[in-house]
Image (cartoon, grey):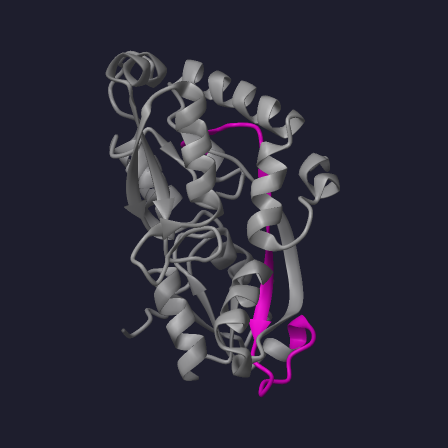
Amino acid sequence: MKPIRRTFNLLTLVDAAALLVGAPAARADDLDAILANKKIRIGVDFSIPPYGLVDENMKQDGSEMDCAKLLASDLGVALEIVPLTGANRVPFLQTNKADVVMASLGITPERMKVIAYSKPYSVTPAAVGVPARVKIAALPDLVGKRVGATRGTVNEQLLTQQAPQGTNIMRFEDDSASTTAILSGQIDAFVTSPAVLYALNKKDPSIKLRAAIMLKYFKVGAGVRQQDTKLRDRLDVWVDTNMKNGKLPAIYTKWFGGPLPIEQLNAKE
């Protein structure tokens, strides 16, 4: 698919759209409905491994899938997975298509204007990923290069903020399109997580992707609607409990091959 080459303001398109739409009409807190219906709808993005993926047996899997299963189990309710993309994570909450979003959702001031977050339970670093054939080591090296990012994500935001003038920024509608673009040579680099680079290299070692420039570490939280304060508070307790008993750190280690970086998780903004 062809990327759309437009520049956006600091507020991402997704967040801006959510601001225009506004919050839904007042209603009972979602936690009450979830417990009464004995079901929770959790949005997960399966296009960005190892956070979310579909394996060779067409089974939905990944670190966020494990977190969603753990949350539903701890609440004692059935789990309904709502597949989504990076660009529609916030709109799916705003339009009540999901009760909770667990999709490597970085906590940012812009998103906090329109949704609420649980306490952070993971981190996602943003890096400029490049193949071995491309010589990029610092931000000035991006000038004249085609650099991709997925629309509506913090990666797009960071690229827009930090890329020097003369960078050819190319925006894609989902992470699968961004990945296809880098693998096919349509772009020279893309902003993503080192974990994604690791997963792609593991699948095809000849790619030799590397994190050339680290842009920022983002804390990851579960997203909910702002009015669902009881649900948010319950999620905070859930995070505290599963951080202390080691279940959330264990999920991180299982999928990312190393310990959860507690220092980054607890760092003050």
Residue drawn at (43%, 16%) of the image: 229
**Residue 209 percent location from the top left of the image:** 57, 75
Residue drawn at (39%, 61%) of the image: 175
Q: From what the image shows, is residue 89 above or below residue 230?
A: below
Q: From what the image shows, is residue 44 above or below residue 127?
A: above
Left or right side of 139 for 130? left
Left or right side of 243 for 183? left
**Residue 171 percent location from the top left of the image:** 39, 66
Residue with the most extreme right position = 263
Left or right side of 211 for 237? left
Residue drawn at (46%, 58%) of the image: 49
Left or right side of 79 for 163? right
Q: Is-magenta flag for residue 11?
A: no
Q: Quadrant of residue 75?
A: top left
Residues rendered magenta in the picture? 113-140
Residue with the most extreme bottom position = 133
**Residue 82 percent location from the top left of the image:** 28, 40
Residue with the most extreme front position = 57
**Foreground pick, 108 / 263:** 263
Q: From what the image shows, is residue 5 above or below residue 81?
A: below
**Foreground pick, 2 / 178:** 178
Is residue 219 visible to the viewer in this orientation of the structure? no
Q: Locate the N terminus by quadrant.
A: bottom left
Residue drawn at (41%, 61%) of the image: 150
Q: Locate the C terminus by quadrant.
A: top right
Q: From what the image shows, is residue 61 above or below residue 19?
A: below
Is residue 63 visible to the viewer in this orientation of the structure? yes
Q: Quadrant of residue 99?
A: top left
